[in-house]
Amino acid sequence: MSEQVERGRGRGDVDGYEKHGGFPVYRAAEDDGGPDFGRLIEAMRVLQDAAVSVSAPADVVRQAAEQAEALAALLEPHRVPEGQQPGGRSMGLPGRGSLLMLPWTVDKFDATGVRSTGVFRRFHMGGNGAAHGGTLPLLFDDLFGMITHAYGRPISRTAYLHVNYRKITPIDTPLVIEGQVDRVDGRKTFITAKLMDAEGTVLADGEALMLVLLPGQP
Ligand SMILES: CCCCCCCCCC(=O)SCCNC(=O)CCNC(=O)[C@H](O)C(C)(C)COP(=O)(O)OP(=O)(O)OC[C@H]1O[C@@H](n2cnc3c(N)ncnc32)[C@H](O)[C@@H]1OP(=O)(O)O
């Protein structure tokens, strides 16, 4: 039977939903990882763009490999368990400071929906100037997670995610994605979203079913 969940309630405010399945408690990083963390993550993205778009002399590639290995060795001793690192939890940074997520900026986040803006970068390219098809479901899935959260639903997992590719999605072009909860039915949250260019042309649209986790579910 369908139910109308009160809009605008925060996570944990809904009776019986305080456990979020088997998920540990996730909190936003208080200081976005400190003064230089965002800078590090953006430099890593620029490096990824460069690494996949250069054709450099062997000596330059060797030097770059050595510097990348040295950088990894510098960071390696500071690994922490999931949920303690600022990467992915820094709400003030593009893509929350994650290198997996698209480096987009959320400019609307409430119970009526979530909107995010940004560009697909060179390292997201599939071919002929278009974003790789696999990067779009990533963008949609992350948005659907945020929409679920902003709506006040407990942590949910994607049961299905459907993307319609309507037009080529260009890299290095400002785009916007926006979506909202359409319907709630028990554990099920049905969500839709659209990816558009600056003129409002729909490049892709998507829908998903997000399922609230049962106690202990991973
Ligand atoms: C701040 C931190 C934020 C962290 C966010 C994390 C979320 C990120 C979002 C993700 O990307 S999650 C990763 C991708 N998804 C997964 O890995 C999910 C893997 N699948 C599962 O874990 C389970 O299949 C799942 C928990 C989704 C559901 O298993 P259950 O055994 O709990 O549910 P069940 O199969 O009994 O289905 C419950 C209802 O949903 C329906 N259902 C399930 N899968 C469906 C499907 N694919 N299509 C249509 N209906 C579906 C099912 O028919 C049934 O409907 P009824 O209640 O009406 O009978």
Image (tube, helix red, strand yellow):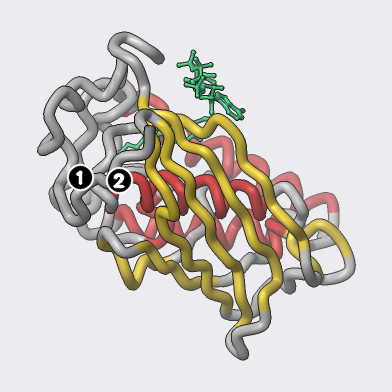
Q: Position of residue 72 (x, y in %)?
A: 49, 35
Query: Which residue sits at x=36%, y=66%?
Result: 106
Choose between 170 and 137: the one closer to the eye: 137
Give left or right: position of 18 versus 108: left
Q: Which of marks 2 and 1 is nearer the N terminus?
A: 1
Mark sitting on residue 29: 1
The residue furthest front is 1
Please indicate, yes or no, whether residue 60 appears anywhere in the rendered image. no
Q: Is mark 2 within 8 Å of ligand 1?
A: yes
Residue at figure coordinates x 44%, y 67% from the top left: 116
Which one is in front, 133 or 120?
133
Residue 181 location, quadrant: bottom left
Residue 165 position in % (x across, y down): 77, 61
User: Does ligand 1 reach within 8 Å of label 1's beta carbon?
Assistant: no
Amino acid of disc 1:
Ala
Q: Nearer the viewer, residue 81 or 4?
A: 4
Please state which amino acid type lies under the numbered disc 2: His
Q: Mark 2 points at which residue?
A: 149
Marks 2,1: beta carbons within 8 A: no
Q: Residue furthest bottom?
A: 199
Q: Position of residue 190 (x, y in %)?
A: 48, 45
Dot label at residue 144: none
Is residue 70 among the parts visible in the rendering? Answer: yes
Viewport quadrant of the C terminus: top left
Label 2 crowd bin: few (<14), some (14–19), many (20+), radius 10 Å: many
Residue at point 48%, 60% (across, down) = 103
Q: What element carries label 1?
A: loop
Residue lying farthest right? 128
Instruction: Give x and y (percent) for residue 186.
Output: 35, 31
Left or right: 21 with respect to 203? left
Question: In the shown orientation, is residue 126 left or right of residue 71?
Answer: right
